[in-house]
Image (cartoon, coloured by chain):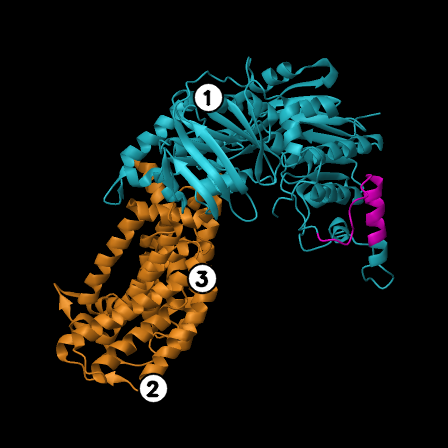
Amino acid sequence: MTWQTRLRNAFTSQEGILFIITILAVLLISLQTDRFLTVNNLLSQARLMIEVALIALPMTYIIITGGIDLSVGSIFGLSAIVLGFVWQDGGWPLELAIILGIVVATVAGFINGAFIVWIGVPPLIMTLATLALYRGLALGISEARSASGFPSWFFEIGAGNTLGLPNQLWIFIIAAVFFGVVLSRTVFGRWIYAIGNNEVGARFAGVPVAWAKLTIYTLSGFMAGLAAWIFTARISTTRSDMGSGLELNVIAAVVLGGTSIFGGSGSIFGTVLGVVLIQILRNGLSLAGMKGDATIVAIGTILILSVLLNSFIQRRLSSRG
Amino acid sequence: MPPILELHGISKSFPGVQALSGVDFSLELGEVHALLGENGAGKSTLIKIISGVYQADQGQMLIDGQPYAFHNPREAQRAGVATIFQELILYPELTVAENIFMGHAPRSRYGLIDWRAMRQRAQELLASLEIYDMDVDSKVGAMSVGKRQRVEIAKALSHNARILIMDEPTAALTEADVERLFNIVRLLKQRGVSIIYISHRLEEIFMLADRVTVLRDGQHVATKAVRDTHESDLIQMMVGREIDDLFPKLPSQLGATVLRVRGVARHPLPRGVSLEVRAGEIVGLAGLVGSGRTELAHVLFGITTAQEGEIWLDGQRVQIKNPSQAMRLGIAYVPEDRGNQGLIKQMKVRENTSLAILRSIARSGFINHQAERDLADRFVRELSIRTPSIEQVVNKLSGGNQQKIVVSKWLASKPKLLIMDEPTRGVDVGAKSEIHRLISQLASEGMAILMISSELPEILGMSDRVLVMREGRIVAEFSRAEATQERVGAAMMGEVYRQPIPEKA
């Protein structure tokens, strides 16, 4: 392959087009306002997007296998509530409370996976049910009270910096590289694509389909728990409605990033770009003076346009060969 | 009288492939015209152009001497062209009558569907095809493939089809259904319907067709009257070379017993099967569709598990719970349904070849990409798989080459026991012969092979020993010398012919 075709392929791939759109968005917004393209603003925006970004990583795996996890927002809320409750009401050491929050989230994800794999409940139905169930548990445990007054060391992960970058950004970078490498370089990653393209065929080729799916739904719960801990440390309180609607932001970012909702294709790089683009639009449009409601409408419109543009370009390319 | 259908210089290309170049074809009134060619020769493309699915890049189509160009299948239907594709397109939840008149049901005065007229006309249509054993009110979903196909034919006639295209109509039929299909074809011919008939089974062409057109690599090779040609002549035109022996079985040394099965059962099929396969031996498993052969293979490969009975491998009792475990035990299974079970069609040649053994070419989970490429390159070379590169998506390859990739995937796992389910179904003659050669070679290298096939010549030509399954049990066993078409066929049907168990919908 010559470098020209390499370059052409890079810029006409899903990710390449999204990358160009992202750059264009940055340029246009920074022409509108000079408060956007500043180090401080960008770093604080990075802090805001991390929770969605972390959960979007396993969601990418799940959507590539042809599944979906609608319960991540509720797992996120449940995990935060458990953390706050056992620390404030149960008197547990905060370190243990953090671990328990993540364990509960992981188990919640495992339960999703177990029903999907062993009972054969469709992912959409199962996670729609646990969307309600886990949220209900969070409400029941918290009894609509919030936890706050955490010691100052707790806020480090949500508000502190290391080497000039927000701590949670470091966590995300490590996680994104890990998820990206696993997907593109390992046996497990190949299995995920194989399952998404043809689950029966994968099974007939000896791919441990049940095990792989169970793993990714469990992983989804774990990452929701990790994100809940970081979020609690960022806003310094836990409430039972935390993370409601989060699943839609996550899924929007993954799909915008070029992962097919029908399964079989997608990448972690695309998902990262999707998350970044949505955050840039949200922040940029409000800085440019757009009102809150109008911002949401604008983001929705831009999402549709970019998905259309992408599929238009892909179709033109494939018809040209 | 001009031919009812004429094609002149039809060309069609797809990205990277010239599917047809300058093909001529003509169809006379009331003629059965067979279309023959290896997979990838352009037969499908040609019939899709005639039926309006594709549009030709170049060339002209005449119907009754008038130029026609169809932009979609509906226009072709209106002009009297109907196609019966391999995958039948019926609505399983609707009745026979509703399926036949889907989209053009007779209307009453008030614009509502006139159910009585519809049922009556459906009955008349079926009677005109001498089909008397079908209830127009029963749902299509529960019917056998043969019956559903008859519904499709009636549906085509309800559109007053004058040109009927049949794409491998016998591929999934039982012997009895094949016989009925032939009768229907002859009836239609008498009524002046012109039929384009595609089949890989040469003997059918000699039984049914008036003329035959052979395509090769998108080009028209010859059109001949069937009585002026013979089998080896056609094969040579299709593949462009002589094939002296379709079933080159090499002699092989039989070794120790590799697989021993005792009383294996799983509801509803199989119902207690015992058999043995020795190293170097090819055991042919014959039987009708629905006799439980595939279900047995699924139990042996861990797709489903045995409820009763014992499985021994190399003298060890084994429990096979899932395919990856079966694979570790040295069992490989080339499944019946290549598109859904055998391959991940959207993935590349390289990725399909390595899928079963990925773990063994990985270090701490990371795929060794060089080893993977070497593996794919080696099999493409050894099995002469015709593909532009190992990075080609397998969907774009012909049936024979796809099947070779399924076989590659399993040879890569170095199995002791290879189970092949219809190894040459939908595969062209050239690739078929190559696959037979390969199976024979593997056996002579000491592999134990259990081969399921619905083609008796394949069973008889390849097997050291033939087992016959009927209604979930092994009912007969023949040595290579004893096995004849009549004996095996009689064992398949049973002494008294009974309706075979319908295959699951």
Name the front one of labels 3 and 1. Answer: 1
Quadrant, the N terminus of chain B: top right
- Chain painted in orange in the figure: A
Residue under pointer 2: A144
Left or right of B329, for residue B12:
right
Quadrant hosting residue A169: bottom left
Give the image location of residue B103, x and y in percent: 74, 53
Q: What span is in magenta?
A: B119-139
Q: Nearer the viewer, residue B386 or B491?
A: B491
Point out the tag, 3 or 2, that comes first from the N-terminus: 3
- Chain painted in cyan in the figure: B
Residue drawn at x 45%, y 70% is A129
Give the image location of residue A215, x and y in percent: 33, 57
- Does B416 appear in magenta? no
Q: CA distance from mark 3 to mark 2?
A: 29 Å
Name the front one of labels 2 and 1. Answer: 1
Residue under pointer 3: A123
Q: Of the residues shown, which amino acid type is indicated by label 1?
A: Ser
* Mark 1: secondary structure: helix
Is residue B3 in sight in this rendering? Answer: yes
Q: Of the residues shown, which amino acid type is indicated by label 2?
A: Ala
Residue under pointer 1: B440
Q: Of the residues shown, which amino acid type is indicated by label 3?
A: Pro
Give the image location of residue A148, x and y in percent: 22, 84
* Mark 2: secondary structure: loop
Left or right of A118, for residue B174:
right
Quadrant hosting residue B235: top right
- Does B138 appear in magenta? yes
Q: CA distance from mark 3 to mark 1?
A: 45 Å
Residue drawn at x 30%, y 69% is A105
The correct choice, above or below, for B66 with respect to A173 in the image is above
The correct choice, above or below, for B136 with respect to B331 in the image is below
